[in-house]
Amino acid sequence: MLSVRDISVTYGERAVLDGVSFELKDGSVLALLGANGAGKTTLVRSLNGTVPLSAGEIVLDGRSLGELSRREIASRVAVVAQENETRFPVTVMEFVLSGRFVHGGAFGWETEADVGASTQALADCDLTEYASRLMNELSGGERQRVVLARALATNASLLLLDEPTANLDLAHQAMMFRLVRQRCDSCGASAVVITHDLNLAAAFSDEVLMLEDGCIAAKGKPAEVLTAENVRKVFDVDVMLDAHPVTGGVRVTSLF
Amino acid sequence: MRLGLVLLVLLIVVLIIAGMLGAERLPLTGWTEQQRSILLDIRIPRILLGACVGASLAVAGAGLQALLRNPLAEPYLLGVSNGAALGTMVGFVLFQNVEAARPVLAFAGAVAATIVVYRMAKSRAGMSAERLVLSGVIVTTFLSSVIVMLTTLLDAARLRSFTFWLLGDLSQSSSTGIWISGVTVAIVTVVLTSQARSLNLMMIGERDALDFGVEVGRVRLLVFGGASLVVGAAVAASGSVGYVGLIVPHLVRLSIGSDNRLVVPFSAVAGAIFVVLADTIARTAIAPRELPVGAVTALVGAPLFIYLLRRN
């Protein structure tokens, strides 16, 4: 259970987040939407304690994030960020195993559990045959899947995903959301996903949170939040909304 | 692991060969009194110092490269060696009778140069390879100028020996220098190896390291502190031997990959082998005269640096 209580973040004089509060139940997926510069990445970064709060508190599983060490936070929270090129030759398996850092000792070599969790995560992300390939030999989309595999290998109870589908083709976009959904449904983990794809947000999330200038503009179930009025207010574009012919969920079509 | 064994055997072989070769070639057994004296009093101390210096510079290079995510990070190119050289020189000029002053001031100089280069190289957008190298060049050039100015305080005889020392000179080995360098490199190698898993994550990215539980500030302090310590001790004993920290970790990574749990300790052994070999060449190439060992390492290192820079 994640509880975000009236948090604010300031960079110098500028308030990037201002009085944000919400709760995220175990097993649920929250889609975080907003225009560029709305504060989405800052909010996600504050959820794993890497951005200091100027006010408010974040409570994870009954403990304030401020009381936890980096290791304790990392054992509970895993991040999927946009991946940059690595300058050293690192294999896919080594990269995924690096996500198990908090499970080992100082000199410690990976245990069978570490290798097992990493192998499973690679298989889940359709990457088994890539295990011994070098990260720099992969395409942007393949690297992004490896980054997701590393997060899944941690077995963390909260997944934070910052535009995870940016480099992915259609099939792998759906696969990524499906894997996150599966992890939340089967293990009781929860996830916060930043995305610009309103239809993916509607299809895979339990709740949607719209940010505007560091404040919550709307929050609730996808059908409640994804209204033409909210989308126009936050993104300044007109959209048409109807029911998806197969799933029955909300379908958003831009009116350019 | 097999490479570790190969490196250890190679180190022993190189140490033995280095002991036999020189202006006076020695047999494996049955030495005369004079030969025994050459071996025990001159050659072995020099070889041991070379091994310690090589291990120190290679370990510092391996640690700095992983920390800064930059295969070009190297104590000599970053100005750390010159910081230590300036510190040593201050000790040489101002505290001539206090032997411990030189390594202490060398350490202080190395720390100061590291901090300045790091601050200069880091921008809001991160730290590019080019920016780091440029910062290192600027600091190195500045420190070289200060060193040259200070040399005007030396008389002709000391000036010649100091110039030779600046280019890397193992001929002035003292038991104090060997002990200080040997103990610091042993401790720093163990400490950096204990941080190798953190360094593996830092090598991917500082943000990744933070996200996955690394205490980034502590690791940075240990690597910068450890690198400054070993470079300070090595430079105080032997001057600035360049490019060892660049060549050795690069070759180790080519052989076994980028896992710092292996790269750091293997670099220590390979660095020892490399400098002892380079010094053997320096002693024998134009015997009975000698080359500075730094000139030999630079002959190998400079082309490799250009190759890495182009590939980067």
Image (cartoon, coloured by chain):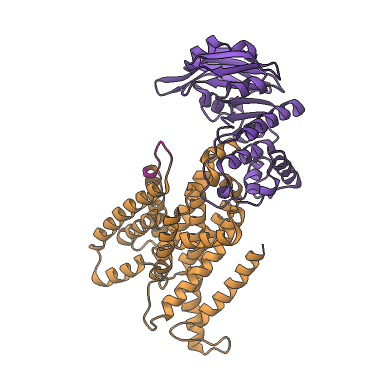
Chain colours: A purple, B orange
**Place of residue A197 in the rendered image (x, y in percent of width and height, measured from the top left):** 57, 24
Using the rendered image of the protein, determine whether residue B241 is visible from the camera's viewpoint: no
Compared across the picture, whether A134 is left or right of A103 comes to left
Q: Check the image and report above or below for A77 versus A88.
A: above
Of the pair A23 and B154, the residue shown nearer to us: A23
Q: Which residue appears at 49% of the width and 12% of the height? A: A233
**Place of residue B50 in the rendered image (x, y in percent of width and height, measured from the top left):** 48, 69
**Place of residue B182 in the rendered image (x, y in percent of width and height, measured from the top left):** 52, 63
Compared across the picture, whether A151 is left or right of B235 comes to right
Using the rendered image of the protein, determine whether residue A107 is visible from the camera's viewpoint: yes
**Place of residue A216 in the rendered image (x, y in percent of width and height, measured from the top left):** 54, 14
Compared across the picture, whether B129 is left or right of B190 comes to left
Q: Is residue B122 magenta?
A: yes
In the image, the segment drawn in magenta is: B120-126
Of the pair A162 and A244, the residue shown nearer to us: A244
User: Magenta part mainly helix, strand or loop?
Assistant: loop
Q: Which residue appears at 52% of the width and 58% of the height? A: B59
